[in-house]
Amino acid sequence: MRKLFALFFLLPLSSAYGGGDESVQVNQCDYNRKIGNNVKTRERVFEINENQYLYVKQSTAIKKDLDKADLNISASCQSLTGTHYTGTTEEWNGYFGKVLKGLEQKGFVEADVTLHTGNNSVYTGYLTSREITVSAQRQDKSLLYRALAVLDLENNTLYTLSVSGEPSLKEKLEEEFKAQFNNMSIHTQEQKL
């Protein structure tokens, strides 16, 4: 069974996925994102099994000084070669399980997860997608984490978007999440709020 790869935390946790082999030629993601100023973009290739590769392009940015707190923005495109995404429930559970594991590794041991469906979803297109909000706590900090993952099975590509920050920024976080979604360019689906 194949797994969706949770790389919302790719930059700080890249060592958890082993070394990247940038010399391997894989499908390039059709990915055109501008998430803000001072954006850091990283492209990596991971060998997940023999002759199976995961290409990842991730952009991250931080919006500073919003009521003396920051919003963290991340967008990524993940394309598989040599294997295929399936979109099964098990695959999605594994994907978001890795998101929660990333939060746990950052010390957030208590988390409430809300799955957004129907009118509560930002994305309402025809591609398979999942959208969640996580409210997480650790001893010294609370975090609100809003995430969308859109799976394009035809092109074997997963697109992700996340915005996170302190719960006091909930309204600004939602506004930023919707603004980032409206700037998202997924080649098979053009949808605006």
Image (spheres, rainbow, N blue to C red):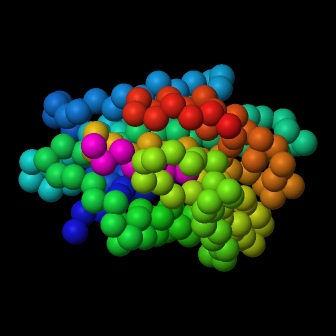
Q: Residue at x 27, y 55 (%)?
A: 85
Q: Residue at x 64, y 48 (%)?
A: 122
Secondary structure mainly formed by the magenta segment: strand
Q: Give the image location of residue 187, x and y in percent.
A: 41, 29
Does 82 sit left or right of 69 as displayed? left
In the image, which residues are magenta?
A: 148-154
Q: Quadrant of residue 192?
A: top right
Q: Give the image location of residue 2, x and y in percent.
A: 24, 63
Magenta residue check for 128: no
State which quarter of the image contains the N terminus.
Answer: bottom left
Q: Quadrant of residue 167?
A: bottom right
* Nearer to us in this view, 67 or 77: 77
Q: Give the image location of residue 171, x and y in percent.
A: 84, 48
65 lies above or below 123:
above
Q: Farthest left residue? A: 50
Does 94 sit left or right of 177 as displayed? left
* Nearer to us in this view, 5 or 43: 5
